[in-house]
Amino acid sequence: MKVVGVVGSPRKNGNTELLTSYALQALAEEGLTTELVTLAGLNIQPCTACMECLKEERCSIEDDLFPLYEKIKAADAVLLASPVYYGSATALLKAFMERTGYIGGRRKVFAGKVGGPLVVARRAGQNFTVAQLTYWFQILGFFVPGSTYWNVAFGREKGEVMDDEEGLRTVWTFSKNVALLVKKLRTSD
Ligand SMILES: Cc1cc2nc3c(=O)[nH]c(=O)nc-3n(C[C@H](O)[C@H](O)[C@H](O)COP(=O)(O)O)c2cc1C
């Protein structure tokens, strides 16, 4: 049973990466294999609507996206993590969502997997961003477990997110629920 955490911040070793590592730590404790994928430094272009992926399971854009699509396709659970940029997910993560969603959506490759959003904000835009990421999971057939609050933590400079005790607790509980659901679903296969 494997979970992949995709970090959509262009800043390496930042708050979103720390929060995702924390979530993966809770999942590893439950016996899941974890992998953190950071999109920082990768070339991931937005969808060009060429529609090639409707004919074949491929993408016409030759960049770093397709191996990541295959990675999340093979996983049992996927976390999408983003800092808030102008009240929204980052353009980098949005490009990832557009293309992985379009390649895999009609093929139903994500249906029945477990997943959910993780969001870091300095001050505002977090609720919209949680909703934005949740739409991706829901339209693709993922099961999205809950927590004790929405999966948001606050921080500005690198590392500050680890001081948000309530945010961390929320993400920890969410991650435990991801593990529980993955195990229930996989043992009933
Ligand atoms: C271009 C840009 C836009 C941002 N817009 C927002 C925003 O709308 N709301 C907010 O609360 N924080 C905003 N921030 C702050 C980041 O969300 C915050 O610093 C976060 O911790 C960065 O996460 P990272 O360390 O993973 O990159 C913005 C930061 C940048 C660079």
Image: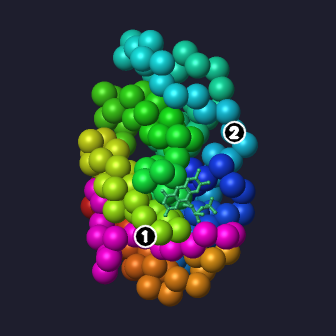
Q: Residue at x 57, y 73 (%)?
A: 155
Q: In the image, is 94 to the left or to the right of 142?
A: right
- Whichever of callouts 2 and 1 sits on the residue coming sooner in the sequence is 2
| Disc ID at residue 42 | 2
For mark 1, what is the residue? Answer: 152
Q: Position of residue 47 (x, y in %)?
A: 48, 24
Ligand 1 shows up in the quarter that is: bottom right
Disc 2, ligand 1: is the CB inside 8 Å?
no
Q: Is residue 166 magenta?
A: no
Residue 78's spot in the image, x, y percent?
46, 54
Label 1 CA crowd tier, 10 Å (few <14, some 14–19, many 20+): many
Question: Mainly helix, strand or loop, the magenta region?
Answer: loop
Label 2: few (<14), some (14–19) or many (≥20) C-alpha neighbours in 10 Å? few
Q: Nearer the viewer, residue 121 or 76?
A: 121
| Secondary structure under the numbered disc 1 in the rendered image | strand
Residue at point 72%, 57% (across, down): 12
Q: Is residue 181 above or below residue 112?
A: below
Q: Which residues are magenta?
A: 143-158
In the picture, residue 18 is in which quadrant?
bottom right
Picture quadrant where residue 131 is located: bottom left
From this viewpoint, is residue 184 visible? Answer: no
Q: Estimate the x, y position of residue 184 in percent, counting from the top left.
A: 31, 67
